[in-house]
Amino acid sequence: MSEAEIFEILRAHIWAAAMMAMPILAVTLVVGFAIGLLQALTSVQEITLTFIPKVFAVIVVFFLSLGYMTRIALDLFNNTVLPIISR
C-alpha cells in the first residue's frame, strides 16, 4: 500500500466523521445561539437553561439522523475497508 493510498483512506475517514457529526453540531449551534440570545434579552443567567435544551436537542437529532449516519458508515466501510481486505 502506497503513501498516497493511506492518505486517501485517511481523508475519506475524516470526511465521513465530519459528515456524521454535522447534523448534531449544527443543531447544537442553533440551539446555543437561540438560548444565548434569549438569555441576553431577558438577563436570565441560569446555567441549566443552556445545558438541558442542548442535551435534549442533541439526543433528538441523534436519533433522527441515525439512519443517515449509518448509511455514511456503511458506504465508508464498503468503499474503503472491504477493498483493502479483499486484496
Image: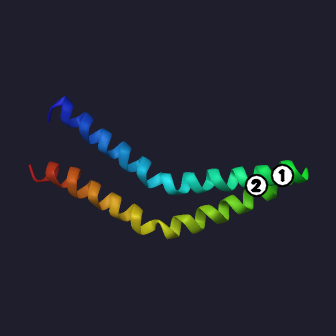
Where residue 35 is drawn, which disc sits there?
2
Q: Is residue 44 visible?
A: no
Distance between mark 1 and mark 2 Cα atoms = 6 Å
Q: Report x, y in % for residue 33.
A: 70, 50
Badge 2: residue crowd in 10 Å (few <14, some 14–19, many ≥20)? some
| Residue drawn at (66%, 61%) of the image | 55
Instruction: Give the vertical position of 60 relative to 51 (above or below).
Output: below
Q: Residue at x 42, y 51 (%)?
A: 19
**Disc 1 residue type?**
Gln
Where residue 43 appears, x then y in whole percent?
Answer: 91, 50
In the picture shown, does residue 53 fall above or below 42?
below
Residue shown at 10%/53% (left/top)? 86
Q: Locate residue 73 relative to residue 56 in the image: left or right.
A: left
Do callouts 1 and 2 mark residues in contact (Cβ within 8 Å)? yes
Colouring chosen for the image of the structure: rainbow
Where residue 54 is drawn, which disc sits there?
A: none
Badge number at residue 39: 1
Residue name at image x 55 percent, y 65 percent: 61
Determine whether, in the image, residue 83 is placed left or right of residue 35: left
